[in-house]
Image (spheres, helix red, strand yellow):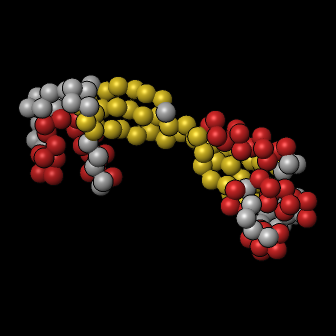
Amino acid sequence: MALADDLHPYQYLWDGSQPGWGLTHINSQHTGLALQFSVPGGSAQERLSARKTIEEFKPLSIQQVTTRLHGCKLFPLGQFEAKEARRIAAQARQQGLTVLEEPSSTVHFLPTNLLSNRVLLIDDENLAKRVYEAAILHGVPVRHIEA
């Protein structure tokens, strides 16, 4: 099987010259959270509750919070690990806020050497994908984990 020139530097992953390499298949579960307001910008009570709940709003005055939320029917809070998302959502709901949750899953591969406890990071996503595909085609063992 002929390799593309840019894959040659990575063939040690599968050619046996550096034993112990495998791919770790990581499935990460996250939850996206957003606050949904009853009116654009939130009601007075929703703005007060958001100020108590959202970390970045806590040091702000209510006028600054009002400015930040102006015109927003939805305010994205970000992506969180599932346990943290549940905590944040529960805290917001206790303050009377409506929270939208959107679970998502991300799959990553990470070349891992189990003998030397090293990992290989490839910054170029396209190259990384091709290296992982070549490694799988060459029979590199794949270990699955949930994160």
Relative to 35, residue 73 above or below: below
- The image shows residue 57 at horizontal and vertical percentages of 73, 62
Between residues 122 and 113, which one lies in front from this camera angle? 113
Relative to 68, residue 82 above or below: above
Q: Residue at x 71, y 39 (%)?
A: 87
- The image shows residue 110 at horizontal and vertical percentages of 33, 38
Q: Residue at x 13, y 46 (%)?
A: 9
Tally of marks: 0
Q: Specify whether 8 is left or right of 34.
A: left
Between residues 57 and 126, which one lies in front from this camera angle? 57
Q: Which of the 4 quarters of the picture holds residue 82?
A: top right
Q: Specify whether 33 is left or right of 22.
A: right
Q: Residue at x 48, y 29 (%)?
A: 146
Q: Quadrant of the N terminus?
A: top left
Residue 139 can be seen in this image: no
Q: Residue furthest front?
A: 59
Q: Which of the 4 quarters of the picture holds residue 90?
A: top right
Q: Residue at x 25, y 27 (%)?
A: 114
Relative to 54, residue 93 above or below: above
- The image shows residue 65 at horizontal and vertical percentages of 78, 68
Q: Which of the 4 quarters of the picture holds residue 58?
A: bottom right
Residue 27 can be seen in this image: yes
